[in-house]
Amino acid sequence: MKEQTTHRRSFITTLVGGAAAFGLSSVLAPLKTQALNATPTGEADEAEKWFAQLEGKKHKMVFDWPKVNNGAALSWALTLMDTYNEMGVKDEEIGIVLILRYGTTPLSMGDVVWNKYGFGKRTEVIDPDTKVFSKRNIYAKCKTEDDNCFELFQKRGGLICVCSKAIDHSAEALAEKLKKDKEAMKKEFAENVLPGIKRMPSGIWALNRAQELGCKVCVSG
């Protein structure tokens, strides 16, 4: 039994972090400590309330989005909405969830930290205007009517959430790399999560919960 427990903990330690999104590798110690901590009841309760927005939706899908992949999940989600609209289905009848985790964790945050910590380079996101690594979160807001962005998706009723573990672990790992205070970095990351994006106990929990509530799954990373 002891050997099995050790293997399980090792597996969790390897998978739950979002440090890979920032090009970091020396993060095993903080990951191991936090991966074994229980999720606060309050956070789980808030997550359940957030998922209640799916109630009554006729068509439901969750997009698991672990890699940026040129914004594929966002594009596919909006295409699905448009397709249903063409079939006479209103946005109000559609329930779509985007789950940001692992490599897409930085997409949950605003321009301030993108510019400050070079998230564009760390995630290999190119700004279409400058043609270099982006100093802004190009997925946050639309610059033209033809853009795909979170703001548009949310206005149409789309739901976006992010893995809390990935945010915290990434903040700790980056703080260690830059020799900054870990708690201050976690606070900074938390304060820069974009409006309307809900933190989940973990991204993989959110993926499972969405399926339990009737969402079909699309893996897009």
Image (spheres, rainbow, N blue to C red):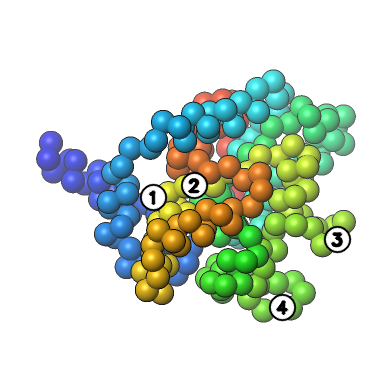
Nearest to the observer: residue 90 or residue 48: 48
Q: CA distance from mark 2 to mark 1?
A: 9 Å
Q: CA distance from mark 1 to mark 3?
A: 36 Å
Q: Position of residue 62 (x, y in %)?
A: 60, 38
Q: CA distance from mark 2 to mark 4?
A: 29 Å
The C terminus: image quadrant:
bottom right
Disc 2 or 4, which lies upstream in sequence? 4
Q: CA distance from mark 3 to mark 4?
A: 17 Å
Q: In this figure, which residue is indicated by the disc labeled 3?
A: 144
Q: Residue at x 58, y 66 (%)?
A: 113
Disc 1 or 4, which lies upstream in sequence? 1
- Residue at the left extreme, as displayed: 2
Disc 2 or 1, which lies upstream in sequence? 1
Disc 2 or 3, which lies upstream in sequence? 3
Label 2 with label 4: CB-CB less than 8 Å: no
* Amino acid on which disc 4 is placed: Lys
Label 2 with label 1: CB-CB less than 8 Å: yes
Label 4 residue SS: loop
Q: Quadrant of residue 169?
A: bottom left
Q: Position of residue 136 (x, y in %)?
A: 67, 68
* Amino acid on which disc 1 is placed: Val
Q: Residues within 10 Å of mark 3 (few under 14, many from 20)?
A: few
Q: Which mark is residue 131?
A: 4
Q: In this figure, which residue is indicated by the disc labeled 1?
A: 16
Q: In this figure, which residue is indicated by the disc labeled 2?
A: 163
Label 1 with label 3: CB-CB less than 8 Å: no
The N terminus: image quadrant:
top left
Q: Can the viewer see residue 21?
A: yes
Label 1 with label 4: CB-CB less than 8 Å: no
